[in-house]
């Protein structure tokens, strides 16, 4: 029995963590779009507090797509943006073809995410 090689995903999300404000609009939009029960969703905003010297701290909000994310397949088939991207108040998420998004990864604190095939 031979294993079939999974087809690589064509589209993904480019997330710029530098500009996420932690508004949770992406998380709420996803939950509403897919009628997820409380505590579930295709994207979760993680709050990360890093202690720094001299009693300082660095606070970052990190939108993290979960295993439930399918990039809003029903929406994107119609030419619409995924709900998280459409509702992102900071415009720090972009949906598109992976080959195009890679070209836009020009600075630190950016991540390219694609769903499992």
Image (spheres, rainbow, N blue to C red):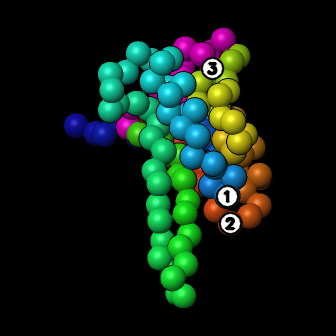
Label located before the other in sequence (3 or 1): 1
Residue 109 lies, in percent from the top left, at 64, 62
Identify which residue is drawn at 52% across, 87% down: 53
Please give the name of the residue rendered at 72% of the width and 56% of the height, measured from the top-left corner.
Answer: 105
Lower position in the chain sequence, tag 3 or tag 2: 3
The residue under the point 63% across, 20% down is 76
Q: Where is residue 90 in the image (x, y as percent from the top left)?
A: 71, 42
Q: Earlier in the sequence, mark 1 or mark 2?
A: 1
Contact check, label 1 and label 2, Cβ < 8 Å: yes
- For residue 51: magenta? no
Residue hosting label 1: 18
Q: What stretch is highlighted in magenta?
A: 67-78
**12 up-or-down from 108: above or below:** above
Place residue 75 in its image quadrant.
Answer: top right
Residue denoted by label 2:
108
Q: Along the horizontal axis of the image, is 99 left or right of 5?
A: right
């Amino acid at each position: 029995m031979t294993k079939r090689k999974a087809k690589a995903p064509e589209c993904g999300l480019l997330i710029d963590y530098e500009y996420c404000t932690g508004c949770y609009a992406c998380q709420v939009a996803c939950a509403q779009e897919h009628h997820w029960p409380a505590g579930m969703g295709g994207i979760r905003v993680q709050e990360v507090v890093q202690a720094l010297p001299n009693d300082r701290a660095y606070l970052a909000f990190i939108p993290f797509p979960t295993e439930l994310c399918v990039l809003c397949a029903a929406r994107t088939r119609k030419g619409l943006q995924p709900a998280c991207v459409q509702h992102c108040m900071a415009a720090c998420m972009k949906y598109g073809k992976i080959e195009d998004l890679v070209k836009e990864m020009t600075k630190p604190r950016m991540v390219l995410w694609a769903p499992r095939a």
